[in-house]
Image (tube, coloured by chain):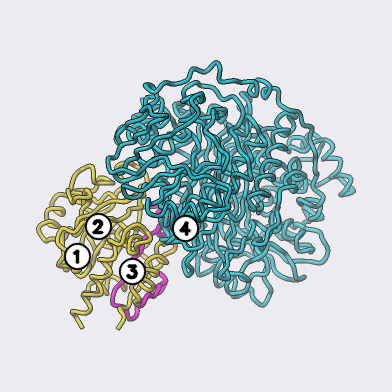
Amino acid sequence: MALRFGILVFPGSNCDHDTEHVVANVFSQEARLIWHKEEALGDVDVVIVPGGFSYGDYLRSGAIAQFSPIMQDVVRFANDGGLVMGICNGFQILCESGLLPGTLLRNDSLRFACRWTHIRTEQTSTPFTSAATPGQVLRIPIAHGEGQYMADEDTLDALEANNQVVFRYCTADGEVTPAANPNGSARNIAGIRNAAGNVLGMMPHPERCAEAALGSEDGAVIFESLLKGTEVAA
Amino acid sequence: MSTSTLEPPPVTRALAEDHGLTPQEFNWICERLGRKPSFVELGIYSVMWSEHCSYKNSIRYVKQLPNTGDALLVGAGEENAGLVDIGDGLAVAFKIESHNHPSAIEPYEGAATGVGGIHRDIFTMGARPICALNALRFGRLEEPRVQFLLDGVVRGIGDYGNSFGVPTVAGEVFFDEAYEGNPLVNAMSVGVVEHGKTASAIATGVGNLVYIVGSDTGRDGIHGATFASEEISEESEAKRPSVQVGDPFTEKLLLEATLEAIEAGVVVGVQDMGAAGITCSSTEMSEKGGHGMVLHIERVPTRESGMTPYEIMLSESQERMLIICKREDEAALKAIFDKWDLNAAHIGEVTEGERVKVYWHDELVADVPAEHLCLGGGAPVYDRETERPAYLDATQAFTLADVPDITPASAEATLLQLLAAPNIASKAWVFEQYDTMVRTNTLVGPGPSDAAVVRVKGTNKGLAVKTDCNPRYVYLNPRRGAQIAVAESARNVVCAGGQPLAITNCLNFGNPYKPEMYWTFVEAIAGISDACRVLNTPVTGGNVSFYNENPEGAVFPTPTIGMLGLVEDAEAHATQAKLPSAGEMVVLVSPATWQHRNDLGGSEYLATIHEQTTGDAPHLDLAEEHAVQQAVLQLIRDGFATSAHDVSDGGVAVCLAEQVIFSEGQGLDLAIDADADLRLDGLLFGEAQSRIVCTISADTLEAAREALTGVSVQLTTLGRVTDTGRLQLQVNGTPVLDLSRDAIRLPYTRTLPQAMDAPRT
């Protein structure tokens, strides 16, 4: 049975088609685009909030999208234990919606940055990373102007203590260094999960590196993890 | 000129002149209308007869460009952009356009709306944009004003394109004093559409409805087209309100809604609103459709109250389209735009006849035959005076005798200086601010390749795209310089694995009323034509931008070429300049009878090291060029060439250094044998055309040579790829270069960040 992915489409989403392509054409799963004005997700196993510039991000990234009708059902779905993954703008929206702690500030360079980075997989006991090896380094692109993850020290300490930091920016060899941090994120954080473990947010784009032709297949491990998770459940 | 009073001012000769119309043009208007135009009509004529919209001083020559070819589905001028068949039932719409004047005074919005405008030209045809390119030219990088402009232009392009969700995959950035005060911002969009699903910019069907969709209409950009048709001066700052303001978010919604409406079959015709806004779209669609139109412009949704009919007709507010739909499809059209939270306002009908009648609350404020206004119709067409520029006598008389040659001992220092020159140094500072990967089609992005390769999902194919023009060559020899611009853009596409198919061009020149300038324009058109004929790349359209001139002088004549190539098997043929594994052979592919030569005229070497832009443009023979390109394309398609990089700015030494920089630890160990009388600077840094450095595995080199039997090229083995990371080169047995990758990478990568990220004092 194919896994059913629901991919949200806000006005201004622009990685919706890319995510659909990876899910449907690379992993042969069911992908359904869900318009933000809809009020129910319907039957889905995984919700992906894709990248882009929802509502133009003129106010603050993700600030308006959280009020879209569909988001109420996403919150309900997440609270019921459903799997939700936010990529880039999707991560920002999940933070704004309160599904994930912290926030994303402008990059410390004050410039948009699109380039290849490396991230280290800090947690493999999540449904999103179970196919990865502990500490696995992924070569993965970023493309954002507001990707500097920030939270107060207590929140950051709690994230670490609860094993909620899933990815950190690192060198090609897996070293977490200031130079490997492309945007000034606190503690080099590139991706986190919620306390329950069913919601993931990450700034880098796994859908952009799930095919060898695009320069890296390292992002595939996230989709493979999701598939593997359902095999276990089934 | 005040436009906000409620009572329109009386139309006088002086007011017409204020609108940029010559006395003769004003007389024509009066004669053809049989009366004096109304104030709104004066605005309409002035903007439609502006250089920017009418091409009045260029169209005679632009029409001489070769514009036919088997792959062309829509030729130049027929629609908003040309359309090229790429097989599999798909076609590519692509076009390049300038936004120079707005960017000169308001770089962020000027560049952003340039990007928005060119994308609208593509999706108004029903094609989804899949990538963008841009060609930028500025004054000297060390100038604070230039840094301000570069920063603003790059942010503008980035913010617009990134939000719109189309990757910016290639382009060029060039710095020279000639562009101080007159930066050039040329933006190109490439889109894909299924055959038979294109939309037309045409108004037909009496009684069909005219809709304006998208953004509200505001007071921005009024007379933008007229502003773009004069020289930049101190007063230009006061024309800042002529610059439009962009909203990429609305453009993204407009894209999705427009494509949805076209797909749903509820669109009879559609035209985007760029220069001259409602005026241009309504009159051009009427003219093309052979129909008239009645518009009730008080129904146009406006951004602010109190706008006059004059302002509404001339506003260049962005992110708007004019759509013609049948009455029975009206509800469906409105539902689509409602879904995307966009305006769709019914503002008129298609009528019999040829007149566009504009009403303002039942008062007829303009009544003009569309044919009067349009290119190819009644708009004026001029042939201007030409005169060979006097400066050419001096530049052509240049000899190298006064330029000291380098020595084997100074070769390395010279190379390092060239690698740090802004025109050669890495442009990563620029392109990392652009989303180069969104849409997940970018197989080869900016950086280590001569052209970008973007795959076309659902097929095995890819598009190889590049913009190019070395304006120094055009300045020194307009005809050959323009030939080289076409040849080099084609060569770049070939090096990336693509067969050049067609071009779009953006002709940036000075004031056409100056005979010397006009001569360079006419010569450049001839040069483009020469090259396009030999390389089989017809011209599908483009734009002309005159008046890139300020009191200090004109820009270099700059005919930017946007080349489209087809990569038959995208994943197999996409090729980069990065070096393959150690041990492979390095081969120079050149014309059969070619010999190393002192081709330093117009070179980066002369400009950077000797601070001169002089001499003649470098050697080019188009037949030789074509042979070299076909040979390298065959080497790539047959799987022989594992990398390819053309020799261009900075000559063979810079070409080889870049290959080491782009690679991951590989080096080069090479030897060149040349005529002992040849100058060392000429050999290393000369920019003779038609040369491509390829790598081929030692096992297959002989087979590769055999595969090229009958092709008029020579393959000269220069040496091998090594695993040392060093660039090592001997000339006639004497070592001249031995540099580590870090030594050449540092100057290459730090120039732009140092200039742009340094703390401002």
Near mark 1 (Cα within 10 A), the count class, few <14, some 14-19 or many ≥20, is many
Q: Secondary structure at mark 3?
A: helix
Residue at the spot 62% in from the left edge and 64% down from the top edge: B345
One can see residue A103 in this view: yes
Q: Determine whether the residue tagged by mark 1 lies in a helix, strand or loop.
A: loop
In the image, which residues are magenta?
A30-59
Report which residue position mark 2 lands on: A138
- Between marks 3 and 4, how big is the CA–CA gap? 34 Å
Q: Does residue B380 lie above or below B540 as drawn?
A: above
Label 1, label 3: how far apart the Cα atoms are: 30 Å
Q: Give the chain coloured yellow.
A: A
- The subunit carrying tag 3 is A
- Residue located beneath label 1 in the image: A132
What's the colour of chain B in the image? cyan
Q: Which residue position holds label 3?
A: A71
Q: Earlier in the sequence, mark 1 or mark 3?
A: 3
The span from disc 4 to disc 1 (Cα, nearest Å) is 30 Å
The quarter of the picture where residue A194 lies is bottom left
Of the two numbered discs 2 and 3 in the rendering, the one whose residue sits closer to the viewer: 2
Q: Depth check: B693 or B396 in front?
A: B693
Residue sitting at 68 percent across and 69 percent down? B268
Residue B81 at x, y percent in the picture: 64, 56
Q: Secondary structure at mark 4?
A: strand
Contact between labelled residues 1 and 2, with CB atoms less than 8 Å apart = yes
Determine the image quadrant of residue B288.
bottom right
The three-letter amino acid code for the residue at tag 1 is: Ala
Q: Is residue A102 left or right of residue B223?
A: left
Please give the chain letter of the residue carrying mark 4.
Answer: B
Residue B454: numbered disc: 4
Mark 4: few, some, or many residues within 10 Å (few <14, many ≥20)?
many
